[in-house]
Image (cartoon, rainbow, N blue to C red):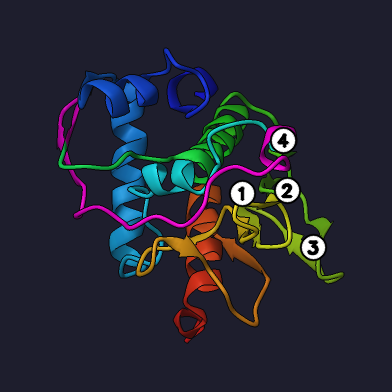
Amino acid sequence: IEVCCSRFRPQSALCRLNRDRQVDDATLAEIVEVALRARAATAGAFDPTLGGELAGWGYDRTFPALRRGFGGPRARPPQLLVGLAGSRVELTGEGQLDLGGIAKGWAIDRLAASLHEGGCPWALVDGGGDLFGFGAPWRVGTPSGHALWVNANAVATSSTRQRRWTCADGTEAHHILDPSTAAPVRGSIHTVTVQAASTHEADAWAKAILIRPALIA
């Protein structure tokens, strides 16, 4: 899934899609469909079509390189249209897809399902902070210092305190972009943790609520 969906591997299916505007890949198509459903469910607060904007802000290289000052504000192009037909994905218009967090959540869900279907009585699958647990009440901590019990569900956290850098013009940036401005979200909430039935849902809603806190209602 990493090889398929990474923005940082030039031969990944995602990079080929962003470059060639169409690709035939069943895994990518399934994850793109999941991402588009999440965009609809969150009324656009979660938006996978901001890959070009992320790159414009400098998030197209390693973090040590970012800290040396790359990127900066840029205008968002017209809405990128994403077409799906079976395993075929097609992009129309300017822009790029970014599936980072939701693809990771989807991978965690797939692994947890595979373990469960294979007869594993209990497991906690941790993908670096986003996790799914089953078969036992797992007690997990959150960045805010709270504890949650996880059993047959998932937890994901999104934060503007991580993955931060300073652009060449001195602008502070991070990797959570507001779709309405194509700029790093600025607000009083800096960290959101969500529990949901699946990890990819928890990841999408954590980002969406960080961008639009009113969605908590």
Secondary element type, mark 2 = loop
Residue 153 is left or right of residue 17, and the answer is right
Secondary element type, mark 1 = loop
- C-alpha gap between disc 3 and disc 4: 25 Å
Q: Is residue 197 visible?
A: no
* Mark 2 neighbour class, 10 Å CA radius: few under 14, some 14 to 19, many 20 or more: some
**Among the 4 quarters of the image, the one containing residue 40:** bottom left
* Residue placed under numbered mark 2 in the picture: 129
Lower position in the chain sequence, tag 2 or tag 1: 2
Residue 22 is left or right of residue 52, and the answer is left
Say above or below: 166 vs 212: above
Which callout, 1 or 3, points to the residue nearer the camera? Answer: 1
Amino acid at the residue labelled 1: Ala
Lower position in the chain sequence, tag 1 or tag 3: 3
Say above or below: 15 vs 113: above
Which callout, 2 or 4, points to the residue nearer the camera? Answer: 2
Which callout, 4 or 1, points to the residue nearer the camera? Answer: 1
Lower position in the chain sequence, tag 2 or tag 3: 2
